[in-house]
Amino acid sequence: MRISNLINKSDYFILEREYPVLKEAAEAEHLKLISEIGLDINFNRPDSVLLKIDKLLGNYQTEIGFETTSSYVAIKTMI
């Protein structure tokens, strides 16, 4: 829940600091990937973003839904 709140608030500096502990408690793998993609985008790690978006879209489209899938496809085209 804490991960979701930080993502929704776009508080990536706190998420970056707390993520090593929070990821162990995260139940959903797609939420971990979304967190890591957000961190990688905000801290300028484009190669990692592309790999993680591919993994997210390849494995979790059902869980994230059409709108989120479309958003990540758009993000991928901008990198």
Image (spheres, rainbow, N blue to C red):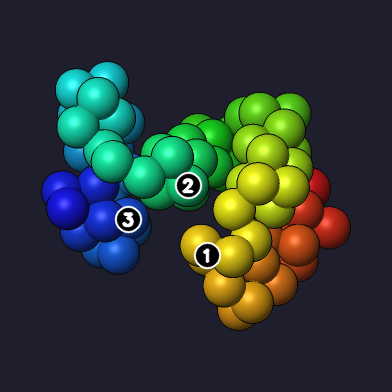
Determine the secondary structure under disc 1.
helix
Residue 48 locus on image (x, y percent): 66, 28
Q: Say above or below: 47 vs 61.
A: above
Residues at discs 3 and 2 in contact (Cβ within 8 Å): no
Q: Is residue 59 left or right of residue 65?
A: right
**Residue 30: mark:** 2
- State which quadrant residue 24 falls in: top left
Which residue is outermost to the bottom?
67
Q: Residue at x 57, y 72 (%)?
A: 65
Q: Residue at x 70, y 72 (%)?
A: 70
**Residue denoted by label 3:** 7
* 13 or 50: nearer the viewer: 50
Determine the secondary structure under disc 2.
helix
Q: Is residue 35 visible?
A: no
Q: Is residue 34 left or right of residue 67?
A: left
**Residue denoted by label 1:** 64
| Residue density around tag 1, few if under 14, some if 14–19, many if 20 or more, within 10 Å | some
Residue 17 locus on image (x, y percent): 23, 26
Q: Say above or below: 50 vs 78.
A: above
Q: Is residue 63 left or right of residue 69?
A: left
Q: Say above or below: 14 vs 66.
A: above
* Mark 1: amino acid: Ile
Residue 58 locus on image (x, y percent): 73, 47
**Residue 76: mark:** none
Residues at discs 2 and 1 in contact (Cβ within 8 Å): yes
Spatial CA span between label 2 and label 1: 8 Å
- State which quadrant residue 75 falls in: bottom right
